Image: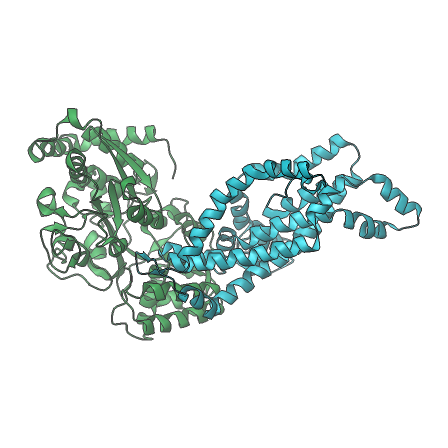
Amino acid sequence: MAPPPAQAVVEDNSGERASWFQVAPLVVVLLLFFGLPMLVVLAVSFFDFSRTEIIPAFIFDNYIDLFRSEVTFRLYASSLKFALIVWLVTLVLGFNIAYFLVFHVRGLLFQIGLFLLCTVPFLTSNIIRMISWIPFLGRNGIFNQALQGAGITSQPLEFLLFSDFAVIVAYVHLFTLFMVVPIFNSMARIDKSLLEAARDAGAGRFRVVAEVVLPLSRTGIALGSIFVVTLVMGDSFVVRTMSGGQSASVVSALQNEVAALQYPPAAASAVIMVIIVTLMVAAILRVVDVRKELAG
Amino acid sequence: MTRSSSETGKKVNRRTLLKGAAAGSAVVATQGIAGFPTVWAQNTKDVTLVHAGGSYAAIKEIGEQASKDLGFKIVMQAITDDVQLNRSLTQPQTIDINNIDSTKLPYLLGKGAIAPIPVAKYKLWGETVPLFTKGSYPNGKMASTQGLAPIEAMFYTDKDAKKLADKPTEFLTMIPTIYNADTLGIRPDLVGGRDKVTSWKDLLDPKYKGKTALVDYAPVGVMDVAMALEARGDFKYADKGNMTKDEIDKTIKIMIDLKKGGHFRSFWSTFDQSVNLMASGEVVIQSMWSPAVTAVRSRSIDCYYVPLKEGYRGWFVGLAPMAHLSGLKLDCAYEYMNWFNSGWQGGFIAKQGYYSAVPSTAKKFLTPEEWDYWYDGKPAAVDIKDPYGTLVEKKGSTRDGGGIWDRMGNIACWNTVMDEDRYLTRRWNEFVSS
């Protein structure tokens, strides 16, 4: 997923050869540890299977079952719904936090200090950060007690925990930083005199953000979006824990199959998943040409 | 649950020394000499055996005690069921002693991964509870054969170990170690009293809407609901442990309707989740494991493991040597498996609420008061502590459900893997995603 080095765009021919040489180690690693296993998964997805064996074959049954099942579409609908909502929320949050850090906080030291503060929660484990929401949002949790204590509600709100709401809260909490970092990075490269020029030309605050800052942060937004979307699509743990097993994701269903030793259908499901996520990333990259933006 | 091992070791050792040292060490010593004259300490000290199993069975302290008693090294590896099955089939060399959940046996059958155990190699077969040796309770009554009953899983037809036999033979699939009777746990304070729940059907009672939970594991989750549906009189299953496609469909349909109506609060996949759901009051009635009930109570929250009138859901696990073992290592494996049921382990897991396949040896490693509480269902004469020395029950309390045969003698159905497990997994995924 790492963008190729900027030199790749240099016109000169010898430079191009050198850049190929530079990406070679990455290519080798990717082929060996991603390409090859992916090929194995692809091969297994056409295999037949019994209770404990996978039987080499070339059948399409696993794919046919997958596309025939209503569950598949429901799972993708659910995962895509989560991906879209979480993407929107983290984008709004990430853009605003990065904007504040870059344009409102004065002094590099203070900026970096606050930026590091954003990363502090990430010094604890993912799992702990997520699980601590459970006692907070629970029926007799702190939040419900506070609401009732303040007289806002008379009954505990049940939808707070073990629900889609809880899943989204945990995703946003876990993944916002992945949006903040790349956007912060692209905003920090914006020449401040551009903003002054826009203001001198009579643009209001909102127009400056919409027509100068936003277009110039698009690389960061694209990269952040790739992180968030792929993380949500590939997740099973958060959805399982925070929904109390009431919601499923594509990957959690795949895990159930693996646990029951049903590898070929799991492999078929994985292949389709990779294709869909790749298409999503390709779509994002089509909107924003990250290579060009980084080189420029 | 985590505690320093040195502290644990000390406590257990002291108790061992005081109460059962003479008897206990005698058992081990005699076996070492009389049973295996070829296995001498100087040859075996370099032997290491990897024992892999679920976290409830492959307990570090047990491995340490075995290493001390036997003179060779036991490495305990606590892993999840699917990882264990995977390793057993695809990398059998990485395991020496396989701690098998009976429901995983059908997956291993005929794969040449585990070796059959000639009955003669296992010294304690005569003292093993008849549930495993004959399929009956001590009073002679035959145990239920719904699901995978012990008698259906204990024996191979012959030494080729390709097929399970339905009656005793000379070749054991595994040495039975621990077993228990599972049921529903409730919060008496939140359901209005201990007597408010008496049947599996209460799990589906609309008054507990939004306050129930199931295990997030298809074979067990579906069976618990089947127990409830049968109790409610919806329909009768030919064998709840081996449903037909039609029965699976009918059951899942009702489950989906219940789920859509908000009947379930959550599905748990780990021990801790089940404890937290109950302790926090998110759930007031759910399928649970015995030690989880104890864990809720240890937080001073009342939790009751209800003896239901339709009976319990039973399970058992055992040990089998992997087929790649031979010579000295195989001899050590037999010696270890004999040690395993010779008492120390049985005493240890009794205090977790599990039963030993050879209770007579476990008894030597329990105080009479502990035995009375855990096995006989009598009121505790002293405070009852878990294997790590933590107080679990105050003096005067009684084990829920009573003595061993009040509980184990009333199994309605055994944990199992169904013939239609592939279909079940598919329908379960549909249920979870609905």
Q: Which of the two residues, A52 or B96, is positioned nearer the viewer here?
A: A52
Which residue is at 10% across, 56% downward?
A: B168
Which residue is at 45% across, 48% downward?
A: A37
> What chain is the cyan one?
A
Residue lying at the far front of the rendered structure: A13
Asked if residue B18 shows in the view, the reply is no
Residue B23 placement: quadrant: top left
Q: Is residue A156 above or below residue B355?
A: below
Residue A101 placement: quadrant: top right
**In-image side of A132 versus B237 (left or right):** right
Task: Tally the numbered discs.
Answer: 0
Which residue is at 78% across, 32% downward?
A: A107
Which residue is at 71% across, 44% downward?
A: A183
Shown colour of chain B: green
Asked if residue B239 shows in the view, the reply is yes
Q: Position of residue B182 (x, y in %)?
A: 30, 56
The chosen color scheme is by chain
**In-image side of A12 versus A271 (left or right):** right
Q: Which of the two residues, A18 or B377, is positioned nearer the viewer here?
A: A18
Q: Which of the two residues, A78 or B277, is positioned nearer the viewer here?
A: A78
Q: Position of residue A222 (x, y in %)?
A: 68, 50
Q: Is residue A13 above or below residue A91?
A: above
Q: Position of residue B55 (x, y in %)?
A: 33, 43
Q: Quadrant of the C terminus of chain A?
A: top right
Q: Position of residue A57 (x, y in %)?
A: 35, 61
Q: Is residue A217 above or below residue B412?
A: above
